[in-house]
Image (tube, rainbow, N blue to C red):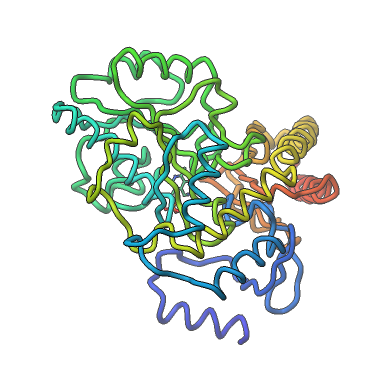
Amino acid sequence: MKLDEIINLDKKYFMNTFGNRTPVCFSYGKGVNLWDIDGNKYYDFLAGIAVSALGHSHPKLVDAIKQQAEKLIHCSNLYYIESQAKLAEKLVNNSCADRVFFANSGAEANEGAIKLARIYFKKKGMPEKFEIITLEKSFHGRTLATIAATGQDKYQKPYSPLTPSFLKVPINDLDALEKAINGSTCAVMIEPIQGESGVNLTSVEYMKGVRKLCDEKGIFLIFDEVQCGLGRTGKLFAYQHLGVEPDIFTLAKALGGGFPIGALCAKEHVASAFEPGDHGSTFGGNPLACAAALAVLDVLIDDGLVENSEKMGSYFMNKLSDLAKKHSTIQDVRGKGLMIGVQLSIDAAVEVKNKCFEKGYLVGSVGKNIIRMLPPLIVTEQDIDGMVETLDSILQEYEL
Ligand code: PMP
């Protein structure tokens, strides 16, 4: 099909939740590159928003999916599943969690986290503890409970009344958190690095304080690592930068390398609150999704992609900081590993993103002035040089 035919079908039949999408349809991906249906090549510095960590069509991921699909795609969680058991073992052996549960998305993993924190206190005979404190500007998903957990009005306003019992406090403000914690609080839920609001980092000092507060008050610390987890920040999990461990954390995005899967991970003392019948999912943890996720973890851990993320992240940040010295339009460069935000001093983020696209580079924009970059973790210095040169030439147009 031709691009305009596809766009016409989309406009006619698809619910218009994505508005005017960038006018391109990709048909092929390999490594850091994508090709559209007309054969034009692009450098993917968004990786499906932190999904394609291994790059596109990684042979080990493709093989794992093919082999599993030929054997068994789905059975049911009524029965034991080999790839599910192996994936659970692999996640536990490589993280601070003792047990996991598999969902189909980040929002669904977060729903599970909220339910687990609540049911724990119900079962302990403390039903008054159900409130969850989250951060302003956070993003936790699009389901009804997770938009209530999300700290951004734009996702919430159209859907009021919201699911009750979510409180918001500003990022990196321990006093505000301490004041907000009350007799109803059961957990604090935080993205170690906020993604959707433009790469906002929590500080080590703050997170150590949050962990201490949670321990003192006997409440849970939940980390939403849906976007920042799995090597994105230069460590397998973002909490490893912070010197604290959560009681519960969630994963999705990169976990299946594009195949939908989310994970709810928890320490034994809280995980054991879930008993038969308390939670479930038809597709969550199906053989195919788990086989894909196992391959992703193998490549991430065994092929040095986490280390590459750290190395290339520093290289990229240094290059962008140099660019900031040259262009007054760059106000701030921030991030960790390959989760990077460039804040502009002008409201031109969407325009800059579109100009990058025209030059064959895919980046994201947040609001009016933040450019977001999350390339696959296999990205090379050469790829980064191309991206930085492209940004340099575009920002040149904005210099007075
Ligand atoms: N949490 C975070 C931190 C996210 O970035 C996202 C997705 N942008 C989600 C949750 C929701 O994930 P999903 O779209 O898979 O439901």
Along the line of sight, which residue is nearer the eye, 221 or 352? 221
Measured from the top left, where is residue 187 in percent x and y?
31, 28
Position of 200 with respect to 223 (left or right) is: right
Q: Residue at x 75, y 41 (%)?
A: 308
Left or right: residue 135 versus residue 225 is left
Where is 3 relative to 372, above or below? below
- Give left or right: position of 39 versus 296: right
Q: Identify the residue at horizontal 48%, vertical 71% (top origin).
A: 73
| Image quarter of residue 30 | bottom right
The image shows residue 268 at horizontal and vertical percentages of 38, 32
Q: Quadrant of the N terminus?
A: bottom right
| Residue 46 as seen in the image, left or right of residue 152 | right
Q: Judge by depth and name the residue closer to the eye, 257 or 349.
A: 257
Residue 331: tell me if it is visible.
Answer: no
- Reply above or below: 206 against 137: above
Point out the residue furthest to the right here. Answer: 382
Across and down, in percent, residue 234 comes to 67, 35
Q: Quadrant of the C terminus?
A: top right
Give x and y (percent) for residue 56. Answer: 68, 62
Residue at 57 percent across and 49 percent down: it is 365
